[in-house]
Image (spheres, helix red, strand yellow):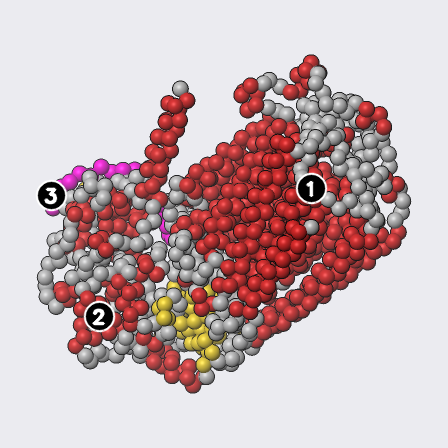
Amino acid sequence: MSDATIPVGALDGARRSDDAAEDSGWAGPGGLVGWLGTIDHKRIGRRFIVTAFLFFAAGGFLAALMRLQLAVPDSGFIGPDRYNQIFSTHGTIMMFLFAVPIGQAMAVYLVPLMVGARAIAFPRMVAYAYWVYLFGGVMLLVALVLNIGPDAGWFSYVPLAGPQFGIGKRSDFWAQLITFTEVSGLMVAVSIIATTLKMRAPGMSLDRVPLFVWAMVVTSTMILFAMPAVMLASTMLITDRLVGTHVFNAAEGGDPLLWQHLFWFFAHPEVYFIFIPGLAIVSSIVATFARRPVFGYPAVVLSLIATGFLAFGLWVHHMFATNVPELGKSFFTAASMAIAIPTAIQLFCWIATLWHGRINLKTPLYYVLGFFFVLTLGGLTGIMLAAVPLDLQVHDTYFVVAHLHYVLIGGAVFPLLGGVVYWFPKIIGRTMDERLGRLSFWLFFIGFNVTFFPMHILGLAGMPRRVYTYAGESGWGPLNMMSSIGALVIAASLLLYVFNVVRGALQGPSAGVDPWGGGTLEWSTASPPPAHNFDAMPVVGGA
Amino acid sequence: MTHRRSIRTLGAGLWSCVIYGATQVRAAPFNQDAIAAAGPQAAHIAHLWNVMLAVCLAVFIGVMVALAIAIIRAPQGNSATPPDSDALAREERPASRAVVLAVLASTAGLALVFLASVHAERALAGMDRTGALHITLTGHQYWWEAQYDDPAPAQVFITANELHVPVGRPVIFTLLSDDVIHSFWVPNVHGKKDLIPGHSATFDLRVDQPGTYRGQCAEFCGYQHAHMALLVVAEAPDEFDRWAQRQRQPAAEPAAPDTKRGRDVFLASTCAMCHAVSGTTASARKAPDLTHLASRSTLAAGTLPNKPENLARWIEDPQRYKPGVNMPPHALPPQDAQALVAWLGTLQ
Amino acid sequence: MNCVRHRAALALTLLLLVVACEREQRIFETSPDERPTVQASLATELQPVTRNSIGGNPANPRSHAYREENNAQSLADGKRIYVWFNCNGCHAHGGGGMGPALMDEQWIYGSKPEDIYRTIVEGRPNGMPAFGARISEAEIWKLVAYVRSMSGLAPSDAAPSRDDDLAARVPENRTKPSPPREQKP
């Protein structure tokens, strides 16, 4: 009942393999064709991770434009049409092209290594998933440049995105992007589940599978059930717009609310596709930097599974302001509050792990501490939002913008940044600079809080979301200015982080097999791992 | 070490500015905020906010303190420290007990918060609705149409963007939409409710403090979602009755020659194709009713103060103030423009 | 080889920019020389309206006619104006009634944009009122473009789709083009 322990024999064979004959079967053909057509999960995973971070940069650039526009009241910097495209594309990129794919990308790289497999299940399907994702993302960015970016929000409510009011082709590109990203997501999810269930190393029973892998399996299972809803919805949106169906047309028997149900049935679980991989990374980092396995392994696994189930029962909390029946809303209040419990169990288990461990306070652990602060705050504002009366005041205001950034950045980006520092030595074979790492952490933490904390106040002070400007008499100017300054600090911190990554990749000192003393199987093989992952197949024993 | 000090200075400096900024949000009387409750619904919600803030703050502090203690008191280690693999075999009772207690405490806190939420919901739903005023509010891109309903058809009147309500009397809204989804939100008075095309929603509220409260559309509705505000003016019941009576009157007959010409300009050119002024032949319902335009304090759904020069500039080019709005520009000859504005100024 | 490929890619991108440009533009500010002039003096007299008809030549890419017909926002606005100003009252949603059908291939007074413009501005015998004083210049050109789209003459990627309303007709973007057959009144 643990993360896998490695018996002594397996480590002897971990060497950097120069043997071309041994490797050639696994490494695949060379040249451009070989690079494009690789089925090595590590190469696919690396390119997936890099691409997702490039989309993160694009989304961040759009956020910077938004903050520049909102820094002062009545600003003429960006007009309403461009601003609508910018915020819609920012949300779409971050949710569909960065936050979900990055978790999947980490899984594609790490899950086969962690379960002791030489390859991922259905590697060609995973490779195809990457190219579909890349194509969809590039299509969306090109559309934005050509003034055809989506302009009805990342959630694309009808009738605003519908055939009458969604003018031009913008929402069609949005709906098409959804199809690409969801197809990609489904394919990767299938592979992760199959890899974990069918390709584990001998001796790795399910109760010895690392918590990271459990979290990724839960995420992938949720994806299988949730993504079809939004694919259906976006297809119906396309047919309404292009072909004249009446799915969302109240006058002919359809209903605009149907869109909201279908969309949020997917999109609420989607935030857990983003959050649970973050929890996966936190489990890995906490175990390594507390020098002990995570406390309460069964509790954490059951909490992950419970979260996966409960996440499907919350979607109406995005619709509390609509005219769905009041008694029904109360059910979703209870469910939305209940889902805090499995998350709380995991948080307390990690604190117990740290409490009873020996702390190695390095950059990855800093990011985990940042995660604790930010995610806990965000989760608590989520409890507030679960209450219908309070939600009716702060729904669609900057309070929700603050909440969502606290839970998504706290729950996924902080762990991710820590995870990149943590696994960088394994993936690249060199180490990043520790001092620069800590500096970029502090800048990011301060910048993040300065940007997003004031938004709680702005929301309660009456500032709605998705507005391209606001009146000076409102008094919202100074806090918006602070938010925008914080955004600059975030940008600086991320540039520093990227600099650290690039410098580490080019000039960093060579990492050994296991620079952090990690306990999962990826740390038992060379850095970077050879194409065949493990020279000798690990046999897992122990408690 | 110096960079640690600079980080601390940066953090402290930025946070001081944030705290200053927080003092500015209610410095001026803008009256669009959720904390200063002017009616029972907003008051119930503000009370719920206080309860939840207290509980959530306590939980947050508890978790952070536990984490801080864990980090500070645990012995140091490094990458070479042998991992505590025996932990898997040990029972770890104190940790189990602590986690179980923490989970139970969290569940109790959640139950408390859930009960507070249900209590607030019931309070909101339980408002006494006898003697209510009925208003049918229709959302348009980007303005609000309000029809004050009455069993006697002659008492019904239509206005736009500025609602007057009597203090202390319940108001029942029927919410409709003419095009896309909008959301009616006047934070000092109540939470929000969406106006969804194809659906009719009912929403009641009551204002107990006289004053002018600003609301804003709270569901993204297109280009000028940011400028779709409305005013709710709560006044004493007799003042409200006087206002309502005036609203029921048709437009006064213009006396001066320039106001007469202004009315002719209105009726002969494009204005009457969209706007209604009762007492004239203009009765189109596609744009705000202008019969009592001069009695309102703002123009263009709260975008501009209602002054003649603003009105003149708005008519000449609405796209300058609200790009994307449905009203086209009108380059009237200067004399006609002045006459039109003069006549509109008589529509009290 | 590389040079040629790069140039081709650049050309394709620029072409895409141009093609998407017109359909997706949203022009809100009107320049002073394009602003409509309303002759309010006709409130007192039965004077005919004189209008600037440079905007009518569709071959001129700077003309209103060309721009509106290829612009999705203009066509959508034209449809909105058509409904708001009750063109349906005589023409229904293109099927006609008291007024002639607008979705067929018969154009009594001409199908060119400047012909339709004059029809709307000056009115026509047998019941078409003169709307020249009632509708601003920009809005008339949007109507002109929309009327042409009713018989499928506007590009189908810019033409409006169905309304969120009772389905009265095949959406304009799926209407097969009916090439105009001009006929004498």
**For residue C175, side relative to residue A32 (left or right):** left
> Mark on residue C184?
3
| Local crowd size for mark 1, using a 10 Å CA cut-off: few (<14), some (14–19), many (≥20) | some
Asked whether the residues under the numbered discs 2 and 3 touch, taking CB atoms below 8 Å apart as contact, a structural biologist would say no
Q: Which chain hosts label 2?
A: B
Q: Secondary structure at mark 1?
A: helix
Taking depth in this image into account, of C172 and C93 the one nearest to the observer is C172
> Considering the image in quadrants, where does the C terminus of chain B appear?
bottom left
Task: Say yes or no: labels 2 and 3 on the same chain.
Answer: no
Task: Say yes or no: labels 2 and 1 on the same chain.
Answer: no
Residue C171 is a magenta residue: yes
What type of secondary structure mainly makes up the magenta span?
Answer: loop
Q: Which chain hosts label 1?
A: A
Disc 2 marks which amino acid?
A: Gln
Taking depth in this image into account, of A542 and A329 the one nearest to the observer is A542
Q: Secondary structure at mark 2?
A: helix
Taking depth in this image into account, of A14 and B85 the one nearest to the observer is A14
**Residue under label 1:** A434
Tell me where the magenta segment starts and ends, as one range.
C161-185
**For residue B187, side relative to residue B88 (left or right):** left
> Mark on residue B338?
2
Residue B224, picture quadrant: bottom left
